[in-house]
Amino acid sequence: MVGKSKTLSDNAAFSALELEVYERNKINIHRLKDHVPEELFVSLAREVIRRVVSKADTIAVEPDVIDADDLEKLAHALIDQDDSVALRIIMDLRTDGKGAEVIYLAHLAAAARLLGVWWEEDRVRFSQVTLATGRIFAIMRSMRHLFEPVALVEGMSALFASVPGEDHTLGVRMAADLFRKEGWDITVKTGLDHDALVAQIEQTPARILGLSISGQHSFEALSRLVLAVRISAPHMSIFLSGQSVDENMPLLELMEFEGISSDVEDAKERLSELWAESISR
């Protein structure tokens, strides 16, 4: 483990993790807890665990078996009241030369799976699991820059989708047509359920996801979708549009979209900026 003379901030291994991103996401996900019904937050916590475990089951990485003692140590660290305990373990893994995918898929996924078992067996409280899932999500977001899409595409491209359960899909189709006239290659997905849409997003070579909502009634489906995409396709930039976004901005800002707009011209400008940023990474 790290010696007492070292701190998180002065360890070179953490240069590969964006600590500001970690802190911001950790704070925002727990602020979100204060603004949504408990049953929704339970659903979001389960979604984080499910997606982390699912991603580990579908992607092959270099063998890196974590032994039972180290696995329990990481799981306990993720529910520890001291936020630095789990971060120090991740820092040690980086110091030992572990890659982002190994940490992401072998270590965090195994800990998430174990925490899920403990939760089902009532060995940990809901508050502990939400603390852990918030940290897991924040750690993964802080490593976003280390992941690349499966395939890259030339030319401006994006996937536009309506949030699962959203009946008003005309807006997203009209937006797609407008962007196509501007030279964008736009793929549209509507009418898909949560898992089907996440699967489509995970496989797309596009780096930008444009989502559309028509009201606050879609917030539960939207928040669940965003968490799933952040884990399943960490390279993806997410842009949100819709007539109701302005009135719900304080809540939406907690979800860390790369862009939010209710205005078409502003959306065109912001997506062009996102495309430029994506190809410079």
Image: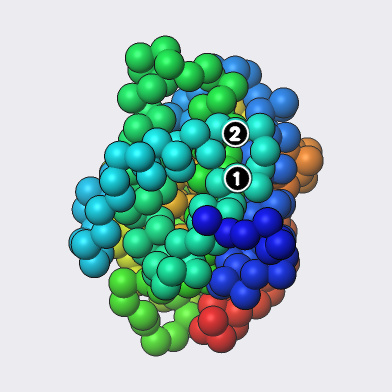
> What x and y, as percent, mark residue 141?
55, 57
Lateral position of residue 203 relative to residue 228, left or right: left
> What x and y, as percent, mark residue 250?
78, 41
Q: Which color scheme does this rendered protein use? A: rainbow
Question: Who is closer to the viewer here, 44 or 274?
Answer: 44
Q: Residue at x 31, y 76 (%)?
A: 151
Local SS, label 2? loop
Question: Who is closer to the viewer here, 212 or 135?
Answer: 135
Compared to residue 165, the image places residue 59 above or below, namely below
Is residue 75 visible from the viewing direction of this image?
Answer: yes
Q: Residue at x 66, y 42 (%)?
A: 83
Gap in Å between the C-alphas at discs 2 and 1? Answer: 7 Å
Q: Earlier in the sequence, mark 2 or mark 1?
A: 2
Question: Who is closer to the viewer here, 259 or 165?
Answer: 259
Residue named by callout 1: 85
Which amino acid type is marked by label 1? Val
Lateral position of residue 245 relative to residue 41, left or right: right
Is residue 238 visible from the viewing direction of this image?
Answer: no
Lateral position of residue 154 relative to residue 85, left or right: left
Which amino acid type is marked by label 2? Asp
Mark number for residue 108? none
Q: Quadrant of residue 276?
A: bottom right
Q: Quadrant of residue 37?
A: top right
Graded by Cα atoms within 10 Å as few (under 14), some (14 to 19) or many (20 or more), the crowding at tag 1 reads some
Question: Who is closer to the viewer here, 177 or 37?
Answer: 37
Compared to residue 153, the image places residue 63 above or below, namely above
Mark number for residue 80? 2
Graded by Cα atoms within 10 Å as few (under 14), some (14 to 19) or many (20 or more), the crowding at tag 2 reads some
Lateral position of residue 13 relative to residue 9, left or right: left
